[in-house]
Structures are given as C-alpha cells and as structure tokens.
Amino acid sequence: LKGGFLSKLNATVVSNKEVAPGLFFLQVKPDAGVPDFKSGQYVALGLAEQDNESKLIKRAYSIGSAPHQKEALEFYIASVSDGELSPRLYQLKEGERLFCATKIVGTFTLDPVPEESDLIFVATGTGLAPFISMLRSNNLWSAGRKIWLLHGVRYENDLAYSDELQSYMRKYRNNFNYLAIVSRPSAGYNGVKGYVQKFFIEDTANAGLSVLTDPVRQHAFLCGNPAMVAEVSNLLKERGFTEHSRKLPGNLHLENYW
Ligand SMILES: Cc1cc2nc3c(=O)[nH]c(=O)nc-3n(C[C@H](O)[C@H](O)[C@H](O)COP(=O)(O)OP(=O)(O)OC[C@H]3O[C@@H](n4cnc5c(N)ncnc54)[C@H](O)[C@@H]3O)c2cc1C
C-alpha cells in the first residue's frame, strides 16, 4: 500500500460469520469506537481498489446492531457475484482492516413516526438489517404498538436472524408478528411460499398474519430489492399511504439497496 493509505483503514473486523453460502454477518469495530447513530441508518464500508491501492472502493451498508450495542457495528451482507466490493468483504477475516466512514447517514429511521403508531416492516434479503437494529432497541417496544415484519428470501437457508425474530414473537406475543416468505423453497419446505407482495394483495388469514393496512394508524417501511419496494409501495399508495419526505411528511418510508 502506498504511503498514507493505511491510515484510511480505520476499523477492524471483529468477526465474520457465514449465515448461508454468500451471506454473512460482519462485525466491525471502528478505531474511534462505535459512533452514535439511529436505527435504520447506514454507513460506507470500503477497501482499497485492487488495481489502484491508493483509492478506496466504498459501498453503503445498513447497520444491524442497535445504537446501545457499543462493542461493534454489525452488518448483514450478501456477496453479490461479480460485485466489486461485497465478495471481498465476504473474505475478510477477524483482525483484518477496512474503511468505515465516520459519518453515519440516512433518514430511514423512526424519527418521524409517532410513538403510538403501528409499524409494518417489509424486507427482502439483507434489507432486513435496519429492522433488526430497530427491533433490538428497547424503546421500540415501549408504546404497546403492533409491529409486523415480513421477510422475503429466495431460499429458506437465507432466513437469517429467524431465531432472534421468533424469540421476539414469544416475548411480545400480542404485539409482534414475524412472517418469513420463501420464493424458491426446497421440496420439503412447509412454510409460507412466494413473494412478500402477495400479503398486500391476498387475504393473509391463512398465514396467521393479518396485515390489515390502515393508513391512519400505521407507518410502513420497505427495504431491499427495488422491484419489491416499488410494487409494495404502489399497493400501499392505493390504500391511502403517502410517501414520506422531509418536506412532506407521510407514512410510507422507502430504502432501495440498488
Ligand atoms: C442505503 C443502502 C444500504 C445498503 N445496505 C446494505 C446491507 O445492509 N447489506 C447488503 O448486502 N447490501 C446493502 N446495500 C447494497 C450495497 O451498498 C452494495 O450495493 C452491494 O454490497 C453490492 O456492492 P458490490 O460492490 O459488491 O457490487 P457492484 O459491483 O456495485 O454491483 C452492484 C449490483 O449488485 C446488485 N446488488 C446490490 N446489492 C445487492 C444485494 N444486497 N443483493 C443482491 N444484489 C445486490 C445490483 O444489481 C447492483 O446493481 C445497501 C445499499 C444502499 C444504497
């Protein structure tokens, strides 16, 4: 590495755990310590470019750990085949160095949501990360609100965090509903199959989950694959949800990963 470059690598890998092939939890400790942030925000991670080591290649990653978890930042990442950065993050080992931006950013947070509002979280794949951070925060649960979480993945092995999410279902029996949906299940899979979109079209009673959309009481958060975000957002807009922006507050919050 050329002079001065090493100083850009300002964080260390605490652990890198594979969840399923190509899917991993990366724990990162910035040298300056875990900064303050809000659940739902993201940060840029980076490594040196392979053919120009004086340049950093950076990408955005949502933080999966909660703000009070000060040991490390946790990320939930998919190694995208042919991707420039994510396959290299996948290879990182404990103790290796990387870049972690000191500025944590993003408006996909619960800030604009009244405490008593019910919440609908919809994620595909690693788009689950911001919701894990929110669910790990104690103040999320304090208001007695209802929370639905729909997580769509391709293969059932990709259902990361499902043990943790099931434990919240037991703990917050009357308030929390988690539903996993698998689009390419193996032959023997007897969970819910298909795409998350269907829960906003079909009667969901069979799945034991009722996302009866109510734009007066609810805020919806959609995160991950842009095709899912666009489709579910259109379905919710038809039912009276309005997209949130700083200028025009609404109850539909969107985060596209690409
Ligand atoms: C606000 C924000 C937060 C993000 N948070 C996360 C996160 O928590 N975890 C995470 O894994 N990714 C996240 N991403 C995506 C991430 O920034 C990178 O785009 C991704 O890791 C691919 O980078 P790459 O350099 O390997 O691929 P590139 O060489 O940049 O190729 C990009 C292409 O990969 C595909 N792609 C990007 N992300 C994914 C994905 N997650 N799954 C499947 N295909 C994908 C798209 O087709 C995209 O055009 C986030 C993106 C944004 C904008």
Image (cartoon, helix red, strand yellow):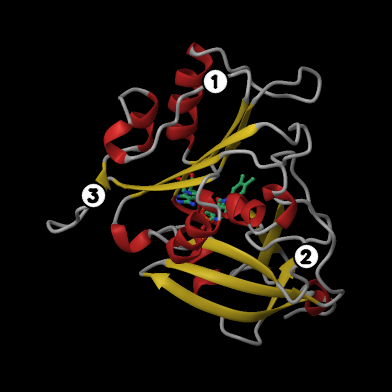
Report helix, strand or loop for mark 3. loop
Q: Mark 3: which amino acid?
A: Arg
Image point (58%, 71%), residue name? 26
Of mark 1 and mark 2, the one earlier in the sequence is 2
Left or right position of 215 against 198: right
Report helix, strand or loop for mark 1. loop
Q: Mark 2: which amino acid?
A: His
Residue farthest toward the left in the current orientation of the protein: 187
Distance from Cα at disc 1 to Cα at disc 2: 32 Å
The one of 145 and 62 positioned closer to us in this rendering: 145
**Mark identifier at residue 165:** none
Relative to 62, is 203 above or below? above
| Residue 40 seen in the current view | no
Residue 74 in which image quadrant: bottom right
Of mark 3 and mark 1, the one earlier in the sequence is 3
Mark 1 burial class by Cα count in 10 Å: few <14, some 14-19, many 20+: some
Mark whose residue sits in front, 1 or 2: 1
Instruction: Find residue 111 and report its horizontal and vertical position in percent.
Output: 78, 38
Relative to 36, is 236 above or below? above
Q: Which residue is mark 3?
A: 184
Instruction: Find residue 202 and report its horizontal and vertical position in percent.
Output: 30, 24
Q: Mark 1: which amino acid?
A: Asp
Mark 2 burial class by Cα count in 10 Å: few <14, some 14-19, many 20+: some
Image point (48%, 69%), residue name? 24
Q: Which residue is mark 1?
A: 214
Q: Which residue is mark 2?
A: 68
